[in-house]
């Protein structure tokens, strides 16, 4: 199993969630959050969003736990629908999940997902 965590621009959240629904992805958590990033192509930090200079920029966090076979397609859908081509589009992180447990039924493993 994989955990996919993406940080995207808030105005792209509807596009991404619509794409995930169309791809029949379920078990998606979407939350508004704040943060800041930087561009380091010239080795000196420059903040991506103007708001980050003063504090934090608004972001949307997406979390999905999925089967290994589904991860590449989900990542592709997020990347395609969150992409503007400008700095600050966000990041996607993919991690392994060691175990999953359904609280109600006690089931474990991929059947939970």
Image (cartoon, rainbow, N blue to C red):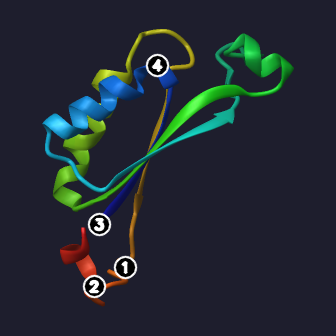
- Residue picked out by circle 2: 108
Q: Residue at x 68, y 15 (%)?
A: 49
Q: Upstream in the sequence, badge 3 or badge 4?
A: 3
Query: Residue 19's x, y, as percent?
Result: 22, 31
Q: Upstream in the sequence, badge 1 or badge 4?
A: 4
Quarter of the picture holding the N terminus = bottom left
Disc 2 vs disc 1: Cβ atoms closer than 8 Å? Answer: yes
Looking at the rendered structure, the secondary structure element under dot 2 is loop
In depth, the one of 93 and 13 nearer the eye is 13
User: From the viewer's perspective, is the residue at label 4 or at label 2 nearer?
Assistant: 4
Give the class, few, some or many, for how many residues have Cα within 10 Å of label 1's Cα (few <14, many ≥20): few
Q: Upstream in the sequence, badge 3 or badge 1?
A: 3
Alpha-carbon span between mark 2 and mark 1: 7 Å
Residue 11 - label: 4
Disc 4 vs disc 2: Cβ atoms closer than 8 Å? Answer: no
Q: Upstream in the sequence, badge 4 or badge 2?
A: 4
Give the class, few, some or many, for how many residues have Cα within 10 Å of label 2's Cα (few <14, many ≥20): few
Can residue 109 be seen in the rendering of this structure? yes
Q: Quadrant of residue 97?
A: bottom left
- Residue picked out by circle 3: 1
Looking at the rendered structure, the secondary structure element under dot 3 is loop
In the picture shown, does residue 107 fall above or below 7? Answer: below
Q: Residue at x 32, y 80 (%)?
A: 102
Alpha-carbon span between mark 3 and mark 4: 29 Å
Alpha-carbon span between mark 4 and mark 2: 36 Å
Quarter of the picture holding the C terminus = bottom left
Q: Quadrant of residue 36?
A: top right
Query: Residue 91's x, y, as percent?
Result: 49, 33
Alpha-carbon span between mark 1 and mark 4: 33 Å
Residue 99 - label: 1
User: From the viewer's perspective, is the residue at label 2 or at label 1 nearer?
Assistant: 2
Looking at the rendered structure, the secondary structure element under dot 1 is loop
């Amino acid at each position: 199993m994989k955990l996919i965590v993406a940080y995207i621009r808030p105005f792209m959240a509807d596009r991404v969630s619509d794409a995930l629904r169309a791809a029949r992805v379920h078990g998606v958590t979407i939350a508004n959050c704040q943060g800041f990033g930087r561009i380091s192509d010239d080795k000196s930090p420059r903040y991506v969003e103007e708001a980050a200079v003063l504090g934090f920029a608004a972001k949307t966090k997406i979390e999905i736990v999925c089967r290994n076979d589904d991860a590449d397609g989900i990542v592709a859908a997020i990347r395609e629908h969150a992409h503007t081509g400008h700095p600050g589009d966000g990041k996607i992180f993919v991690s392994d999940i060691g175990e999953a447990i359904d609280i109600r039924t006690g089931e474990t493993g991929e059947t939970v997902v």
